[in-house]
Image: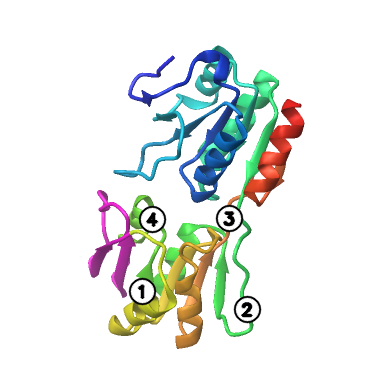
Amino acid sequence: MTDPGTTDSSPPDDARRILILGGTGEARALASTLSESGIGFISSLAGRVNDPRLPVGPVRIGGFGGSDGLRGWLQSNRIQAVVDATHPFAATITRNAARATADAGLPLLRLRRDPWVPGDSDTWIRVPDLPSAAREVAARGGRVFLTTGRQDVGVFAGIESAWFLIRVVDAPTGALPPHHEVVRSRGPYDHASESRLLRDNDIDMLVTKNSGGPLTSAKLAAAAELGIEVIMVDRPAEPDSAVVSEVGAARDWLEALLG
């Protein structure tokens, strides 16, 4: 079954046992592990990134139509369990997955990389959400390295007291701050290149989400080394479910579930 506006390279129905939600590195690693273990699965990506890195195995790209649409898809495709390996800030699909699996009576596992924690040399200003981050930037001004993703740039669009270096994978399409430069690139990044970027652009503030993981963590070490303040957006609250932080633990959970 393919939803309107999606692409679906699905296996036969009898091989569809696990749904992996997300296009993260953890989701791709889990797909590889399950493929090697002979566990049937299908991966689902939201389709918000142009030219995404695809996992091995069958993939569908696109939305489900909310929690009701996801529940119907799970039932019609005879899914036995769901692993939510989405980005820690993908709050909508995480809520929908929790609701849909509960309504369908299916087990749900959340695969989440550990969040970053500040070290002794870090200067973090923790905020609960992006509007709070924007207020901090507006009050301080300066030269800001913004790495919150293209969908969130508009939150900072009304700030005239700061200049922004905006790093994104795909070009932002909404409103932008009046003083900015956009840099398109995709991680991983290393410490030397991040330090050079911060120095060359005279950055005095970094704004980022607490995504966790090693892919983009070099910017934090570089900021600490250069004495740059970090406005760190905390992760949103998530529904209750089983949670693991390692791909191997997710595989073990699935193997125990499937017997």
Residue 240 appears in the figure: no
- Taking 203 as reference, is 106 above or below it? above
- Which label sits on residue 149? 4
Asked whether 14 falls inside the magenta stretch, the response is no
- Secondary structure beneath label 3: loop
**Amino acid on which the number 4 mark rests in the picture:** Gly
CA distance for labels 3 and 4 = 14 Å
**Amino acid on which the number 3 mark rests in the picture:** Arg
**Amino acid on which the number 2 mark rests in the picture:** Gly
Q: Where is residue 70 in the image (x, y as percent from the top left)?
A: 53, 23
Mark 2 Cα within 10 Å, few/some/many (few <14, many 20+)?
few
Residue sitting at 76 percent across and 33 percent down? 256
Q: What stretch is highlighted in magenta?
A: 158-185
Mark 1 Cα within 10 Å, few/some/many (few <14, many 20+)?
many
Nearer the observer, disc 3 or disc 2?
Answer: 2
Residue 115 sits in quarter: bottom right
- Secondary structure beneath label 4: loop
* Disc nearer the start of the sequence (3/4): 4
CA distance for labels 4 and 1 = 14 Å
Residue highlighted by disc 2:
119
Q: Where is residue 113 in the image (x, y as percent from the top left)?
A: 60, 54
- Taking 77 as reference, is 23 above or below it? below
Mark 3 Cα within 10 Å, few/some/many (few <14, many 20+)?
some
Q: Position of residue 69 (x, y in %)?
A: 50, 20
* Disc nearer the start of the sequence (4/2): 2
